[in-house]
Amino acid sequence: MASSGAPKDFGFGEDEELLRDLARKFLDEQLPVEKLRALVAADPEAVYERGEPSTWDEGLWKQIVELGWTGLAVPETAGGAGFKAAGIVGLVEEVGRHALPSPLISTLNATYVLREGEPDAAAAWLARIADGASATLAITDARGSWAAGDTDVSAREEGDAIVLSGRASFVQDAQKAELLVTTARLGDALLLCVVPSDAAGLEFERDHIHDLTRDQASIGFREVRIPTANVVSRDAATALERAWPSVLVTVAADLCGTSEWQLQTTVEYAKHRKQFDHPLGFFQAVKHPLVDVMIGIDRARSILYHAACCIDEGNDGAETAARMAKSAASDAGAYASDRSVQLHGGIGFTWECDVHLFFKRSLHNQLLYGDGTYQRQLLAEKLLA
Amino acid sequence: MTTTQRDYLVDWQRKCFDAGLVGADIPSEYGGGGHQGFQRIANQEMGRAGTPFMINIVGLNMAVPTILVHGTEEQKKKFIRPALRGDEIWCQGFSEPGAGSDMANQQTMAVPQGDGWVVNGHKVWTSLGHFAQWMILLARTSRDHKYDGLTYFLSPIEGHPGVTVRPLVKMTGESGFNEVLFEDAVIADALRLDDVGKGWTVAMTTLTYERGAAESAGGTSGERVPPIRQLIDLARKSFRNGVPAIEDPATRDAIVQRAIVAEGIRQNGRRARVPALCDHPMRLPLQSKVTGSEFSQDNAKLGVEIAGAHGTLYKLDRNAPDEGHWPLAYMNSYGHTIAAGTNEIQRNILGERVLGLAKSK
């Protein structure tokens, strides 16, 4: 529950509104759905038959870097914009609503984790991100465990270098990232270190995934040598735990954005497509589920803003709120996806209809860092103790 | 409700009114506090303290706001203060046997005679009818137009010639509401609210407040124990397959789902007041009736499930958990998913007014 001193507006003030509106306008202009379709879905056989990497617009990414979005979560002391979570989730919703293929989300999440490292050690890396470097988290093991500390990468010390070996799995937008933020086991300690993606000994193995708006890879570490200065924390579990609410709300915000696109697009279809002499929306079997999609989205969005506000306020309830937001956003996303295909009818099942792009991005995000059931399992340990 | 309970609740509302906790935002010339934005705070505090509900809920949430919008100066002076103080209890006369979801299908007729109206008809589902002095009454004054043939009256009930109040028994066996018969009952024209033929418009004002889409004159009931806490307590003392239900993964998941919905409702209320975070001004307010009533229903249903075999027990049974609360609450919850416009009608309104879908007839 929000403490009595919590801001009534979730901390969503003028600056946050400006940022959100700017993101909306920019993406409306730069990435209308026709352009997204041409970009990632021009050839159905490319990704799914021939196994080619999904395509993205690097020129658009350069513009995004110039707008300073990589540095949004970087503290001002490290040269970033130091935006509150309240503002960033508003922007990320727009990113989800346009299904933007980019390393922005992975960079924001890597930034949140780096921020929890030793300030002196992390500052230089944060500054590079603020300058436009993209980054991603390489912290997940081959079993797909989301628990901090479950890693298949181990480290050993050699003079003033660290040597990493093993494998990080399910790395988001790995092929677009310049910096990997990696966990590695060193005896009893769990290190958090930064590995440039061009470091010798890294082996990228691209995952074949359904989502056309991102890439994912597992990364082999074959005796990868990095300077000790690249270690930003020797207690990565604590850093991850502290950053995790921010990571969860970022994915939840992306989900809220894709869900809203699915709602509005399906509503438009239900207004114009006629059967039995009526627009589809006339029939309550169509109308009522769309209302339920909206109710699910609004529940998720309201909890999302609450969670972002808890993070900004340093509230103890931030983790609970963030897990609730991820649970609600995953479930809302699943239902919005389900109805967006079903209510489009036959066309919704085809490649030419855009709903599959958002369906797949949403599904990926529903699963990423734990779906609704997973979040509730962890919430139960807190709430039912 | 017994007359002793009624007297207690009337006394309670009077104390709250004297303390400024009811009618806080109503203009002072009509007996209110004359403030702005006080009522929400008073409601929050009363809710937090777990105070009894306001017996004159129809007066506060429906009659007073509607009279403020549509009433004459005399009507405002005459009705508002006694309603706020609980001196005069109100009931609502919108529903009829043939006019439920199709509310405009009113068959109760009001025929002009002298400087008044002669009313004949049959109203149902009238909560508090047996305690009420007044009714907000929707009646037909013309058969030529479905919507424009309706007129809104403030009708005397208790002791009024031609008006009979009879209890209706609910599915639970409890008597909670009434039917009201009008047989040549005469209502003075001074008790007509707004113009002849404007009844539908006036009724929409009432419904906006009834469905929680606008702030009313005050008084929400507080639950001493939040519903999620009640479910957790029940799961601790109930058993499922030989272990406490609180350890059962499916039960745990279900309770946490309820907690997330509760948080969603709470944060929706907060967000509804931040225009920058609302895409459509009515998108959240119009959801509150559906989400609130289904939240209560789903909680009660889960409670019955958690109680397991004990969920079969009626409150008279000494083994019934929580004095038989769960199955009774579950059945009574349909009152809220049906009343004030069924949730199906609410979903039509949301689909049409917020999403812009074609009207469903």
Image (cartoon, coloured by chain):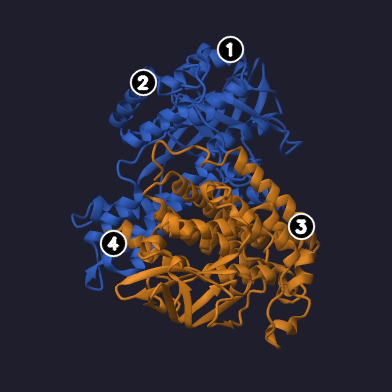
Chain colours: A orange, B blue
Looking at numbered disc 2 in the image, what kind of residue is underneath it?
Answer: Arg
Residue occupied by mark 4:
B307
B69 left or right of B225 in image: right
**Residue of label 3:** A271
Marks 4/2 same chain: yes
Q: Which circle's residue, 4 or 2, is located before the other in the chain?
A: 2
Q: CA distance from mark 1 to mark 2?
A: 23 Å
Q: Chain of mark 3?
A: A
Considering only order in the chain, which callout, 2 or 1, is on the residue closer to the N terminus?
Answer: 2
Give the SS element for disc 3.
helix
In three-dimensional space, the C-alpha distance between marks 1 and 3, rounded to whole angstroms, equals 47 Å
Vertical placement of residue B151 versus A7, above or below: above
Please indicate, yes or no, whether residue B19 appears anywhere in the rendered image: yes
Residue appearing at x 66%, y 22% in the figure: B194
Q: Is residue A282 above or below residue B144?
A: below
Indicate the amino acid at tag 3: Lys
Between residue A228 and residue A170, name the one nearer to us. A228
Residue B167 rendering spot, x and y as whole percentages: 41, 39
- Badge 2 and badge 3 both on one subunit: no
Structural crowding at the residue carrying mark 1, measured as other residues with C-alpha within 10 Å and reported as few (<14), some (14–19) or many (≥20): few
Under circle 1, the secondary element is helix
The residue sitting at 76% across, 36% down in the picture is B144
What subunit carries mark 4? B
Residue under disc 1 on the same chain as residue under disc 4? yes
Residue B74, numbered circle: 1
**Left or right, B36 with reference to B305:** right
